[in-house]
Image (cartoon, rainbow, N blue to C red):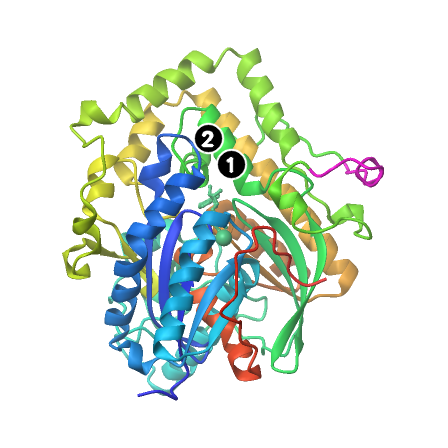
Amino acid sequence: MRGRGLILGIESSCDETAAAVVQRGSRTLSSVVASQIATHARYGGVVPELASREHLRAIVPVARAALAQAGITLDDLDAIAVTSGPGLAGALLVGITYAKALAFAQGLPLIAVNHLEGHIHAVLLQEREYASLASHWADQPDSASVPCQGTTSVVPQTPSEEAVALAPEGLPRLSANPALSSSLNPLSTPQGTGRGPSFPPDAESALALVVSGGHTHLYLCRPAGGSWHYTLIGRTLDDAAGEAYDKVAKLLGLGYPGGPWIDALARFGNPLAVPFAFSQIKTKLHLAGKAPRTKAARTAPIAGLDPHFLFSFSGIKTAVLRYVELHNLRPESEARAARLFPPPQEMGAPSIPPPLAEWVGDHESLSVQALCQGTTSVVPEMLQREDRASAPAGTVPPTTHAEALALCPQPTLDLIASFQHAVVGDLMKKTFAAAESLGARRILVTGGVAANRELRARFTAEAARRGLSVAFPTPALSTDNAAMIAAAAWPRFQAGEFAAQSLSADPSLALGN
Ligand code: KG4
Ligand code: ZN
């Protein structure tokens, strides 16, 4: 039955194949993510050709799983939304082609969504869901279990281990529900008293920091007639923050993606041991005709941006490299990598992927692992066999984490902690400076790096000190997913902004002006 505002979102811009069903941009019925981490981990980064191949293998079962978990069929959908950029061209094309075919066959409108706008809507979606949960609790104060983020599943009475592990320090607790009082509350406001945080209305402007493997961008987001208007305030000139995490982790013999590894190990080191510093960026050099060096830097022009809100993470990456050379840490890093990631053959894993039939058959045959917050990660058996270091995005399996800790001498842990402390400090400094300069009282932090515990704790504390509100998606929705794409599509659906069947991928698609 159509007309219930159900949008199927499809996301395939990088190394996660994702599909989700979201109702009216405010209720997640299902969210399924197939991670390719195991495929790319052995190369220490995403291999575009392999990413496209894996998307092709995963897209059908993932979309079927999203529909099945939402308890609906294609006939119930009102629109298909798909990421059209930025991202890897071949990877984007898989999702776009599949979405176009579905839309055509079902006679449904197709909605193109910018991946960065999707990340921003991950927070907005969860704000709406929490607002509705908050009013639910207000009506039923003694309720033992409540709908999980509007999904068909139910939040367990005690928080999951992952939820507890990811709970940021100092986050205001919601009192009514023990499950949500762990990490599941992504919101923080200085006014958060009594039953929990207050929820800013959608009508309020916000400063959004999108911080991921491909982007470190600051946007001023203003409500505009039921939709949103975005103005670029700052961005990285070279590496994205997540890219720096990935490269430093690789250098230190840790796993891919690097963020979760560094996140897990940093708390065992002294963050002040190595004094990394970020110097003030001088835009003149770049404006004098120097071409941007990375994809992230190419997605938007820098002319006219305040240099105080520009980021650069290639310097700290080089500083870590110098530190490693100077202190002769390479042999230690190589030995660590060899212990943590022995070649696949030694683990008895297949060197070639299993037959396609294993993948695209009935999705019930896939091993489905539920993450917190109603986001479900499809972890095919092949991934689990191929690489024991594989884990849902944003997490590191506890065994390998403990192994890595045992393999890291204290000076290495201090280096890791100092790197993270410096990166988070720089993100904070520029974000809060931009908020102050723009008079923004509401900050949204999203993208894979927003899953970082130190980042969440320090942003939360600083916002409270300044009397501002800050919100993050749950860790599961911080990294790439399709619920954010379906949510971002809702205002476009209402406005009738549909894409033509000629829609193509735009790897450098910019957001706003
Ligand atoms: O948003 P995302 O899933 O994909 C992109 O759009 O790039 O972000 C992936 C990035 C990776 O660089 C990964 O290392 C980083 O997010 N990341 C983290 C954490 N979890 C993922 N960085 C720091 N701490 C984390 N816990
Ligand atoms: Zn992303």
> Pointer 2: residues within 10 angstroms few (<14), some, or many (20+)?
many
Magenta-colored stretch includes residue 287 = yes
Q: Position of residue 52 (x, y in %)?
A: 39, 46
- Tell whether label 2 touches label 1 (CB within 8 Å): yes
Q: Position of residue 179 (x, y in %)?
A: 32, 65
Above or below, comparing residue 371 to residue 339 in the picture: below
Please name the residue shown 38% across and 32% down the image.
255
Magenta-colored stretch includes residue 229 = no
Q: Position of residue 441 (x, y in %)?
A: 68, 67
Question: Which stretch appears magenta?
Answer: 280-292
Numbered mark located on residue 177 in the image: none
Numbered mark located on residue 249 in the image: 2
Above or below, comparing residue 426 to residue 66 in the picture: above
Relative placement, left or right, of 491 versus 179 is right
The answer to whether the beta carbon of the residue marked 1 is less than 8 Å from any atom of ligand 1 is yes
In the structure shown, which secondary structural element does the residue marked by tag 2 occupy? helix
Residue type at numbered disc 1: Tyr
Please name the residue shown 31% across and 44% down the image.
391
Please name the residue shown 29% across and 67% down the image.
66
Please name the residue shown 31% across and 64% down the image.
63
Check disc 1 and report the residue beneath it.
Answer: 245
Relative placement, left or right, of 206 versus 54 is right
In the structure shown, which secondary structural element does the residue marked by tag 1 occupy? helix
